[in-house]
Image (cartoon, helix red, strand yellow):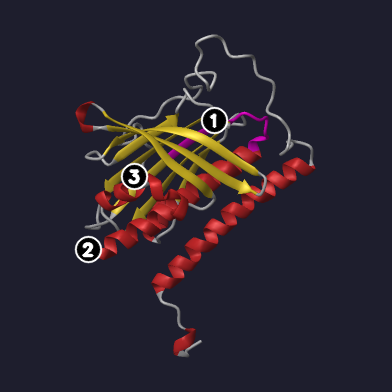
Amino acid sequence: NNHPSGRISSHASEKYLSSMTRCKSRLLVVVALAACAALGLWQVSSKPQEEAPLEPGAPAQGHRGTLPAFKLGPIEHLKALSASEEQTLEDGKLVLRQEEDPTRGKGLAIRDMAATPDDVMEELLDFSNYKKKVAMCSKSVVYGTKKLKGGKEQVKVEMSSTIIPGFSFNCFFDHTVDRKGHSMIWSLDYDRRSDVDDIKGMWYVAPHPTKEGWSRVYYQIDMRLRYRVPGVLYRALSRSSLSSAVSWVKDYSEKRAEKHR
């Protein structure tokens, strides 16, 4: 279409594709949930599997973590990017690595962003506005902050995410932030009761290796639900979580960067 009204700028095309990717990710989760429920693999409205009563003095979550903790970045023992992965990033797309484990959902997302590491970190730490920016986030409230050694910070946030009508997760997160190191790790706040058994995550924002003013962003998650679910659902949930999180961070970080260019 050569008519001016039919032309779409590369920037607009990228935004459209990003939006379509997020929609596809959400649709994948909904389809997986519906399929599992229909097949009797998992009941959306069922109660969690039976749990032993909490022992006196035990944390509200019932444990202090069942998954390994992430460390502040850079990522240790990171496998070098392949030539195809490098090309994927150069094409402005997401590199996604997922681990095969039927008992949890774990993966790594990598994305190049036209924003500095400081811009990206500012968006990641804008917790109070997550509800306005993050798809399916229906609540995000900071309920605790604390200065830590070495200039690091602790930020505790209550968040709710509505996956489909009538089904949502409410979780209490404990973040450790290293602004200078452009990294953040988080886990559940085990002194409060969350709707998942355990979940941990890590962000690391590195300067782009070749593009000045750009960043290469790494995001890892590891999750385990309270419900028995098939491995395919864990894979769908982790894929959706990784891709949607990196997409909104990219969109808003690049908008922030544009303001001071």
- The residue lying toward the viewer, choosing from 235 and 85, is 235
In percent of width and height, residue 161 lies at: 55, 44
Image disc number at residue 260: 2
Which amino acid type is marked by label 1? Ser
State the residue position of label 3. 125
Residue 253 location, quadrant: bottom left
**Residue 67 lies in the magenta stretch:** no
Q: Is residue 251 left or right of residue 104?
A: left
The location of residue 147, given as percent across then percent down, is 25, 30
Relative to 181, does residue 65 appear above or below in the rendering? above
Q: Amino acid at mark 2?
A: His
Q: Residue at x 59, y 53 (%)?
A: 26
Q: Which residue is the extreme one toward the bottom? A: 3
* Gap between marks 2 and 1 measured at Cα: 39 Å
Could you tell me which secondary element the residue under label 1 belongs to? loop
Segment colored magenta: 220-231
Q: Earlier in the sequence, mark 3 or mark 1?
A: 3
- Which residue is disc 1 drawn over? 194
Identify the secondary structure beneath mark 3: loop
The image shows residue 147, relative to residue 140, as above or below, that is above
Are the two marked residues, 2 and 1, in contact with CB atoms closer than 8 angstroms? no
Question: Mark on residue 220?
Answer: none
Q: Are there few (<14), some (14-19), or many (20+) residues within 10 Å of tag 1?
A: many
> Where's the C terminus, which quadrant?
bottom left
Looking at the rendered image, the disc whose residue lies closer to the viewer, 2 or 1, is 1
Q: Residue 83 or 256: which is nearer the viewer? A: 256
Tag 2–tag 3 contact (CB < 8 Å): no
Per the image, label 2 sits on a secondary structure element best described as loop
Amino acid beneath label 3 = Leu
